Amino acid sequence: MTWTVDYATGETPTSFTTIASSPASLTTAYGTFASTPVTVNLPAALNNNSGKVWVRVVTYTSSTGSGNRPSTAIDDFKISW
């Protein structure tokens, strides 16, 4: 599975924008255990935004098969400004 981090603004966003991450490719695979620190910097366009900012971690493709889907978890989430 390949993942992206996206953001949007407003009360009920209808579209999201992908944010560059480090590492650039965020993937998980069935049967593989790994711990990968990921860094994402929100764009300067969001500075001093008085409205809601939405951040999501998403995959755009579905997994297939039975009993062989990768598991993914988010741990130690940190926001700083």
Image (spheres, helix red, strand yellow):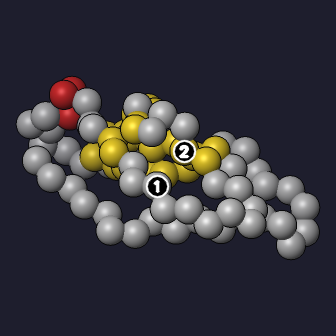
- Residue beneath the point at 25% across and 60% down: 78
Residue 12 makes an appearance in the image: no
Percent position of residue 50, x then y: 12, 43
* Residue position marked by numbered label 2 in the rendering: 26
Rendering quarter of residue 67: bottom right
Q: Tell me if 7 is positioned left or right of 15 in this view.
A: left
Spatial CA span between label 1 and label 2: 9 Å
Q: Residues within 10 Å of mark 1 (few under 14, many from 20)?
A: few
Look at the picture and state if 79 lies above or below 74.
above
Look at the picture and state if 55 lies above or below 18.
below
Residue at far top of view: 45
Residue 16 numbered tag? none
Rendering quarter of residue 22: top left
Q: Nearer the viewer, residue 27 or 61?
A: 27
* Residue position marked by numbered label 1 in the rendering: 36
Look at the picture and state if 62 lies above or below 68.
above
Question: Which amino acid, mark 2?
Answer: Leu
Q: Nearer the viewer, residue 40 or 31?
A: 31
Q: Is label 1 in contact with label 2 (beta carbons under 8 Å)?
A: yes
